Image: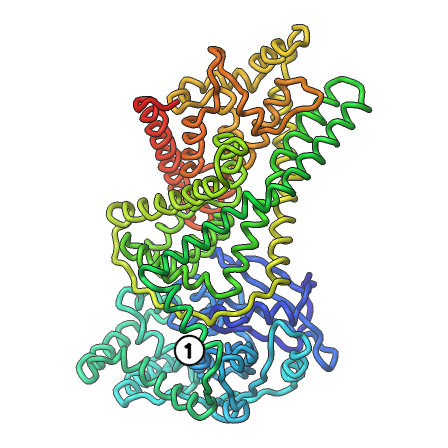
Amino acid sequence: MIEENIFFQKNYAVVGNPNSGKTTLFNALTGLRQKVGNYPGVTVEKKLGQFIGQHGEKIELLDLPGTYSLSAHAPDECVTRDVLLGLRSDTPRPDRILCVIDASHLERNLYFITQVLELGIPTIIALNMIDLAQAQGTTIDITKLSSELDVPVIACQANAKETLLPLKIALSRAEITRSSWSQQLPSPWARAIDGVAAIWTHDEEKISQRDPLVRMKSLLLLASPDTEIEGLAKEMNAGSLLGIALAQRSMLDRELPSWREVLVSARYERIMELCQAAQGRTSSTSETMTHHLDEFLTHPVWGWFGFFSVMGLMFISIFVVAAYPMSWIEGAFGCVGNLIREFMPQGDLRDLMCDGIIAGIGGVVTFLPQILILFFFIGLLEDTGYMARAAFLMDRVMSKVGLHGKSFIPLLSSYACAIPGIMATRTIENAKDRLVTILVAPLMSCSARLPVYALMIAALFPAGSVSLWMKGALMMGLYIFGTSAALGFAWLFKKTILRGETSIFLMELPPYRCPVLKHVFLQMMQRAGMFLKRAGTVILGISILLWFVASFPKSNLEKSNHDKSSQLEESYAGRFGHFIEPVIAPLGFDWKIGIGLVAAQAAREVFISTLAIIYHVENDDETPSSLSTTLMKETRPNGMLVYTPLTCLSILVFFVLSMQCISTLSVVRRETNSLLWPLFQFCYMTGAAYLASFLVYQGGKLLGFI
């Protein structure tokens, strides 16, 4: 952690395009010496780090959100713009800048970097991912690039610490010159900037009209969209300049009708000249392979065949590969429970340990292998570059329902957990598109739903009754159902309460790469740690509470299996379950399932631990069977099975659509700064889940299914 009130001899802001390796480089330089918080007034993360320079001085780095341009729209991009322009009172304007460039996409990265150079702040460029550029057949003349940009350029690889020494030496230099780079603009544009800058500096003699900061502010004010110019003028404390800015825009409309396009094309023309001078290209095997693979994997028809094949393999692996470690974990918890039953005297403490803690936590942790396999495939697909192709395929569908193409990444993140998915919507510029994405993100089946899906599928299809292909297909069908529901509700919201135009989505497909298994396994271990931490805190606490409400108040009945059932019905949990049973009975749920649904509001996987605790409390077997076996034997008072295929399907449909995570609702409250939207989200998702489950169960009964 960073100590407070430390004097730093050098302070750098770290900037760059998204996916340029900026944060990886920041982490490599600072290690564990970091402090993370939020910028006041916004939910954008603020990361500060430090390292010791070559002369023993402390160097501070501020990792700013990635952006493609200073003409920012999204909340995180606005933070980067405002810090670099000195518009945030809580964050001083940086003394120096470290620009991180993806060497394999030099032209795209230089658009933002040249804007930064024009701010007149001493700058160093880290030419990152130089190995990828070389693999693609791209050679970069670093000396030429440094000369043209008039700043130090250091080649490095953020994931290889041995390449960072030259960069650390450069960052430790006492003096760094300011770049003389400037954009060559047509004369109407130059006059417009001069006109605004002259008024800006009229009352302050200390500021020159030629000051780089003033000129960049003037340019951004002139280039801002009509709907944003007034707000940007207020942010810049330049409300008095609004009139002159509008007058200069009118002049540009007359003399240079395509002045907005000219501004962008003029910058790109000079960047292209620079790239032609500083880099050379040769054909590479990786480019040829990428081209041939994309002909199939991004094809309008065959691309979907490849997509569903990959997804099918993933879901079948969840059942096949995970079966063995799941049985080992289940057996280990069973052995621990038997040891406790053998050596502890009978009483409430033993019941708490066996029927509450062991049953509750064990019922959830058993599904850890399936979650790890899910994240292994996700990490593999991200590392190879296939995930971008999946985004490309999905964008064709998403654009038809009115969702912005950038919404795919937050929705994709929601397959792991809706919370980071919702936070990832900060990159969406349009406020309505961002809100729609937030509202539908929890419909994407997160990893916490996976244990519920696996348990219900196991109860629906006993071992050996159907092939693993069938189980995998049903699991994939649930994910497709959730995704389809998200897209359907997005279309509904875009047509009604959040009507707006669909933005254009531009995306660059990265080359295919050999996955780094170390990174994939580190991600898996990180997710395992988070899952086990949750099991040891949230689920442990809820398990103890559930055992208590399912075991008390105690009755005076003799202990037999029949009396244990009566005891459960007379407990606090049993009374509450019977109270809500009339509401959930039309869905095929009994009062015990109702207890699980209510408990699952804390976290979806708590549904598993709740059922495990209820059936352990009810049954007094010394060697309890697996939870799925117990469910298949559970009967109603009339002797009919509780977990019929129709009931299992009803539960699956309910969990696909329902909102059952208080943490997600709290994040929605923070991101929208309103109680209205999380309340609306809970109501529409719960209502949709109830209606869909009702139609499945009652419709199935009408068709003669049980």
For disc 1, the marked residue is: 108
Q: Residue at x 62, y 87 (%)?
A: 175
Q: Is residue 398 above or below residue 504?
A: above
Q: What x and y, as percent, mark residue 262?
A: 28, 82
Identity of the residue furthest to the right in this view: 343
> Is disc 1 surrounded by few (<14), some (14 to 19) or many (20+) residues within 10 Å?
some
The image quadrant that residue 211 belongs to is: bottom left
Identity of the residue furthest to the left in this view: 254
Decide which of 675, 20 is in the foreground and name it.
20
How is the model colour-coded?
rainbow
Q: What x and y, as percent, mark residue 576?
A: 51, 19
Decide which of 268, 227 is in the foreground and name it.
268
Relative horizontal placement of residue 607, taking residue 626 as reference (left or right): left
Q: Is residue 298 visible?
A: yes
Q: Amino acid at mark 1?
A: Arg
Identity of the residue furthest to the top in this view: 557
Q: Is residue 541 above or below residue 490?
A: above
Q: What x and y, as percent, mark residue 398?
A: 32, 55
Q: Is residue 213 visible?
A: no
Quadrant occupied by the C terminus: top left
Quadrant occupied by the N terminus: bottom right
Q: Residue at x 35, y 89 (%)?
A: 184
Decide which of 515, 444 is in the foreground and name it.
515
Relative horizontal placement of residue 46, taking residue 115 as reference (left or right): right
The image quadrant that residue 234 belongs to is: bottom left
Relative horizontal placement of residue 212, taking residue 535 as reference (left or right): left
Label count reads 1
Q: Residue at x 58, y 75 (%)?
A: 12
Element type at marker 1?
Answer: helix
Q: What x and y, as percent, mark residue 531?
A: 61, 45
Q: Is residue 458 above or below residue 408?
A: above
